[in-house]
Each structure stands twice: as C-alpha cells, then as structure tokens.
Image: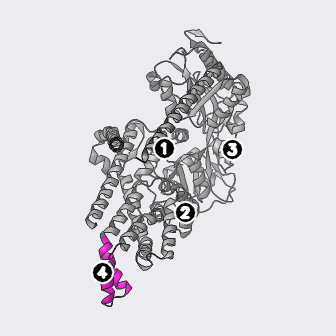
Amino acid sequence: MKETPNLFNMRNLFIILLAIAIASCGNSKKGKDEKQSKANIAAAGATFPLPFYNLAFKTYQEKAGTTVTYGGIGSGGGIRSLKDKIVDFGGSDAYLTDQEMQEMPAAVVHIPTCMGAVVIAYNLPDIKDLKLSGEIVADIYLGKITKWNDKAIQELNPGLQLPDQDINPVYRSDGSGTTFVFSDYLTKVSDEWEEKIGAGKSLKWPTGLAAKGNPGVAGTVSQTPGAIGYVGSEYAFALNMPMAQMRNSSGNFIVPTTESISAAASGEIPADTRTMITNPTAADAYPISCFTWIILYKEQAYADRTQAQAKATVDLLKWMISPEAQALTTKVHYSPLPQSAVNNAQALLNSVTFNGQAIN
Amino acid sequence: MRDKIFKKLLVGCCILVLLVCAGMIYSLVSGSLSAFNQYGFFHFIGSSEWDPHPDRETYGALSFIVGTLLTSFLALIFCIPFSLPVALFTGSYFRGKKIATFISSIIDLLAGIPSIVYGLWGFYTFRPIIIDLGLNSQGFGILTSSIILAIMIIPYASSLSGEFISMVPNELKEAAYSLGGTRLDVIRTVTLPNAGSGIFASYILALGRALGETMAVTMLIGNTNNLPRSLVDTGNTMASIIANQFGEADGLKLSSLIAIGLLLFGITAVINLIAKFIMKKFN
C-alpha cells in the first residue's frame, strides 16, 4: 500500500510533462507561422562544397532574408531527395549521366556553383616543389613505381635529391567524389589505369593503404614517411600540406592554387555544363580540377510548390553565381567559376520555368 | 491490479526487445538476399574478389572474414599473458586485499575508454614504434590492430576469469596445501582445472568483443580489400568495411555489405552461444 502515493505522483508528473509538451508544441508552431512570411528553401546533397554553401547561404540570409537549409548527406542522397521531390534542389559532385537523367521524374538542369581540385600530397622531409605527372601517379597507384628515387620521378625533378625510400600510396577507404575525380583523371592519362582500374567513387586498388575521409588520408600522409595521397584541395589548402606540382596536357608544371583551378574550366564547356574538366587543354590549368553542381527541376511547379517558392529558389541560385557570392569561394579555399561557366549557368537558370512561364 | 499492470508491462517490454531482435534479423536477411542470390552463399563467403567497377562488379567476403578472425584470435593470444596473471593476482594471490581491488579497478578503467581513443593512441603513438622496428614501412596492418585489440579486451578477459578463480572452493585449496603443495602447485593442480571452463568462457566473451570492434581497427588495419599475406600486411575486417563503404553504397554493393553484417552477426552469435553453453556446464 505504501506505493500508492508514489504511483499518483508518477501519474501527476506524467500529466504535467504531457501538458508542458503540448504547450511547447503549440508555441513552436506559432513561431513557425510567423517566420513563414520569408521564404524557406530546403536542400540536401554533397558534403564537398558544404563549407562554401554554409558561408554563402548565411550571407544570403542576412542579405535577402531567405533561409536555406542544406543537409550534407552526400551526392547520392541529394539526388535521391530531389527524385522524391522533398527538396528545392540537390547538391552533387558528379553530374547525372544520360541514363540517370532518364530515371529522374522530370527534366533537370545542372548549375555549377564553385570549383575545387584534388591535390597530390606527399610526405618527404626536406623535399619541396616535387613535380609529378599523371602517368607517374597512375604507375605509383598501380604498384609499378615503388621507390621515390625511381628514374621516372628523378627525370622530372633533376634538381632534387630523392631518397631511396618506399612509396606508400594512400587512398580513400570510403566511397567518395574525390576518388571519382582522381580516378577520372588517371583514366584519361593512363591506358593501363583505364583498362585495369577505371573511374569510380570506390575502386579495386592493387596496392597501398586506405583511410577514411579527407581527414583520414591527410592525417595518414602527414604521419607516414614516404607516403603519397590525394586530398580535396579545400582541405589541403586549409591545412597547408606539401603538395606536388602536376604536369598538365600542355607540359607545364602547375601548382594547385585557386587561380590555376579556375583556369581548368576556362576552355569550351558544353551548354548544360555536364562535363568533367580533368586533364583540360588550357596551358595554365591545374589538371585534376572539378565542378560541383546544384541540380534542380527545369519545371518548378511540382509537389505543391508556390510561384514564390520557385522564385526564391531561382533568385538564390542566380545570386550564387554572381560575382558577390563567387568572391566568397576563396575565403573557404574553393575556386570561383570562370566567366564562361557563369554565362552557361545564367542561361540555364533563365530556362527554368513555373507552369511553363519564365521566372523573373 | 497494479501487480497485473506491472506484469503486463514487463511482458510487453520483453516482447518489444524480441521484436526488435527479430526485425533486425529479418532486415539483415532480406537485405542480403540479392547478394546471396547473385553470387551464391558459399561463393560469396569463399571469394576474396571485391571490385566495385560497374562493368565487372563482384563482391566476396573472404578477405574480411579472414581479417576479422585473424585480428580477433591474435588479439586473444596476445592478451592471455597479461590477463591471466592479473586474474590470478586479483582472484587468488591477493583475493579481497586492497591492492587487488585497486589493480582490478584500474584494469576495469581500460574497458571504459572509448575505442576511438585507442585508435588515436595506436595511430599517433604505437604505429611509429612499428615503423621504427622496421616491421613494415607504414606501420598499419593486422599485427598493429591485433595488439591494440589485445589491450582493449584485457579487462573483459581478466575481470571475469578473476571471478571464476576466486570461486574455487577453499576446502579444495586447503586440502592441497595440507598435502604440502606450494602456491604454484595449488594453482596448477587445483585452481586452474577447477576454474578452467569459466576462464575459457570469459576468453570467448572477450573474443566476441574483439570480433565486433570497428573504430580502432579501421584506423589501424590499413583498409585494403585483399587477403593479408602476412601478419604485417594490411587487411580489412567485416566491421570496418561496413563502416567505410555503406555511405555511398547502393544496389548489389549495399546488399553485399548487409550480407557481411549478417555473417558477422552469425559469427558473434555462435561464439557467444558457445561461451554460454560452457558457463552453464560449469555452474
């Protein structure tokens, strides 16, 4: 019988908690209604451009009042969310292939937002300004070049005293857009790579060791003597890691910088911007550069979206490719789009419609 | 009345837990079906080919099964010389003394350290030692992760086997002493044979813990999807391939990863069952 008051106390407590919960629910709903006057944009996708998007969307919110929520759930997840029509746009590091475009419920457009690159980081104390070519990097990752003083590397670096040390190639253990860009470049410069390994987000590697994420690869390279690894430029620039100069298709050795990365897209790119810009022809371009895209439906009237919502989405994206937003890219170690890519993106955004009418 | 409600509540909770477990098994089985259908169960566990290239997509679990079993059993072997003396110390030599309580609580502290901390310590402190010893040029591999795993499972092995050792009846030990046996004789002929199956069971439980360990191993094993050729070679385990690859996986690859999860579930379940069976026999 002693327990009776206890139970009643418990019950009372429960009722009080329930009441509080209901009351707080009511409050939050009210708050949401008040905010609804300004547009809310929901998006999800690639994690690679996340630092740039966070900065840009925050700046845009202060400027235009539009709140943008972007979930960094990976390119695949971003495209799935767009397919399910639960987001206003999706972010992706890889453009949709023709077949993937077919599988989408409606026509989509790709808007490039900024550029990045994959840099080759290495750990050789006392060696600065190492020069490498795509062929050599492919041979290292194929296990054909195993020593740092290999003839092929020494030939490119006549002024350097390269050590008689094992090369430890490091790659990504998780599926990653960085791996895709890196391997896409290697398939373009090495026939053997194309035949044996190919391009993809995760691969069957013949040699080396693997670590998770950019931080894992960067940490392993910086802690392992003789290691070489490929790392996203935004990460390597922030850490100021030693990185190799890469020989581009014009035969020039290019240091990865925000300018040389932007230069990779300065040539001809297709009108729909769906292209890989690795191994470009421009003489001053860094050869392992890449776009990142925002993908949205060409016809914006779907899933009960209003004209205002569509306009807010397109306005945001137009601002993203404007000089003001592009100037933010270098602050977080990305590269701005060259003018030709901006022109293409503008034309694509102008083609976006709401119920068949142009949005402006 | 309240008794009835309480009883119903208990029954409900138990059923809920059972349902969660059944649901897990169901989703693992149904998720892995397409991989098993594609490759065949025995071919899947017998093949070490792991190639995600879309034109020649093939997945096999052998390298990961080997990696998991190799690291776990090596860890078990490495931990015996440390955990058995601790168990004898706390359970027999200094049973009930302050020093024994002190040591066993220090050892138990090891169990409370998150595995990522072991991983970091292994990465920054232990791996350079392996490199300096010249075992391999990058310090990652089966051996490195086994040694870290061994340290992680010492508390699991030592505290439980210490319990079993202290449960050996005093009458037996006193009888042995009265026959003129030394402490070593008593341990060799009375304590160990009596507590033997309990000690064995506690090592099996420690092994189960090592099998499922993910984070520290992922950081130290090198994550290469090939059959390890030697103890200092790099490899991969079932838990760490899942942790590494499931994020961007879909289709057949996702199904293969779930299948590996199911296999790991099966292996740990069997090992825990063996331990339970032996302990039951002992009691």
Q: Nearer the viewer, mark 1 or mark 2?
A: 2
The answer to whether residue A94 is visible is no
Q: Nearer the viewer, mark 3 or mark 4?
A: 4
In the image, residue A329 lies in the stretch drawn in magenta: no
Give how far across and how far down residue B111 sits, in percent. Answer: 48, 61
Label 2 to label 4: alpha-carbon separation:
47 Å
Is B34 placed above or below A338 here? below
Task: Judge if badges 2 and 4 mark residues of a common chain.
Answer: yes
The chain containing the residue under callout 1 comes to A
Q: What label does residue B127 carry, if any? A: 2
Q: What label does residue A255 carry, if any? A: 3
Left or right: where A10 falls relative to A113: left
Looking at the rendered image, the quarter that the N terminus of chain B falls into is top left
What's the residue at 41%, 63% (across, down)? B230
Q: Residues within 10 Å of mark 4 (few under 14, many from 20)?
A: some
Q: Which residue does the numbered mark 4 point to in the structure image? A: B172
In the image, residue B183 lies in the stretch drawn in magenta: yes
> Seen from this angle, which residue lies furthest front?
A1
Asked which secondary structure carries label 2, the reply is helix
Image quarter of residue A334: top right
Give the amino acid type for the residue marked by disc 1 in the picture: Trp
Give the amino acid type for the residue marked by disc 3 in the picture: Val
Give the amino acid type for the residue marked by disc 2 in the picture: Arg
Q: Earlier in the sequence, mark 3 or mark 1?
A: 1
Task: Judge if badges 3 and 1 mark residues of a common chain.
Answer: yes
Task: Judge if badges 4 and 1 mark residues of a common chain.
Answer: no
Looking at the rendered image, the quarter that the C terminus of chain B falls into is bottom left
Q: Which residues are magenta?
A: B167-196
Give how far across and how far down residue A345 sits, in percent. Answer: 63, 22
